[in-house]
Amino acid sequence: MRILRWTRRVTGGPRRRIVRLRETARIWLFSKLLARLFLAAFLVFATYNPTGRSWYHWLLNGPASGTWKAAATLLLAVAYGVVIPVTWRALGFGGIVLTTSLATTTTWVMIEAGWIDLTSPADAPTWITLSIIAFVLGVGSCWMLIGRIIDGQLRARDITR
């Protein structure tokens, strides 16, 4: 465990404060980022995907009763009800447009470089669109963590522990 010491010269105030920084903080932060990205991808691809194994296909052709379908629908509605407002508050309209532009441009470069082949699978545009939506929701849901990594600033709550 690394200890950072910092001194202030304030009359009547404490001479030293000790802030403990954990070495594993970056590992936990990275795992939180991955978990939120995977949650967004799972949410989008579980709702609909071209393979036929999704909530949409199960709702139309599934053998389950209406109660299970209603419960799954409500669960997805709650999940989207959490992820979409978090993304909107974190990124805003401009951030969503920029994140979508970044993902679309990256996909375009991958297609031009030959890494993605649009001629063989007929449903490749659907997979690309779903991946871009999952990327935007994932970035939006973990934008505060990304901002914390970029600026490196601790919140006041983190310092006073």
Image: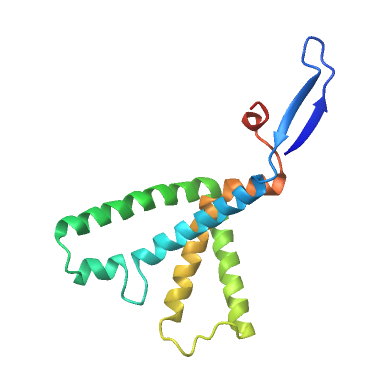
In this view, the residue farthest toward the bottom is 120
Q: Is residue 144 above or below residue 41?
A: above
Task: Count every numbered label the image shows and give the total.
Answer: 0
Residue found at x 53% / y 53%: 140
Using the rendered view, name the quadrant where residue 39 is placed. Answer: bottom left
Q: Which residue is at the far front?
A: 1
Name the residue nearer the viewer: 41 or 87. Answer: 41
> At 50% across and 85% down in the image, what residue appears?
118
Image side of residue 90 versus residue 130, left or right: right
Q: Residue furthest left?
A: 65
Task: State how the image is colored.
Answer: rainbow
Q: Residue at x 59, y 77 (%)?
A: 108
Q: Residue 76 placed where, x, y %?
A: 32, 55
Residue 99 occupies quadrant = bottom right
- In the image, is 135 to the left or to the right of 151? left
Q: Name above or below for residue 105 compared with residue 35.
A: below
Q: In which quarter of the image is the N terminus?
A: top right
Q: In this view, does 65 lie to the left or right of 85?
A: left
Q: Where is residue 93 in the image (x, y as percent from the top left)?
A: 52, 53
Residue 33: x and y in percent read 56, 53
45 on left or right of 66: right
Quadrant the C terminus occupies = top right
- Report the front residue among 58 and 101: 58
Look at 36% across and 64% down and name the residue there.
Answer: 46
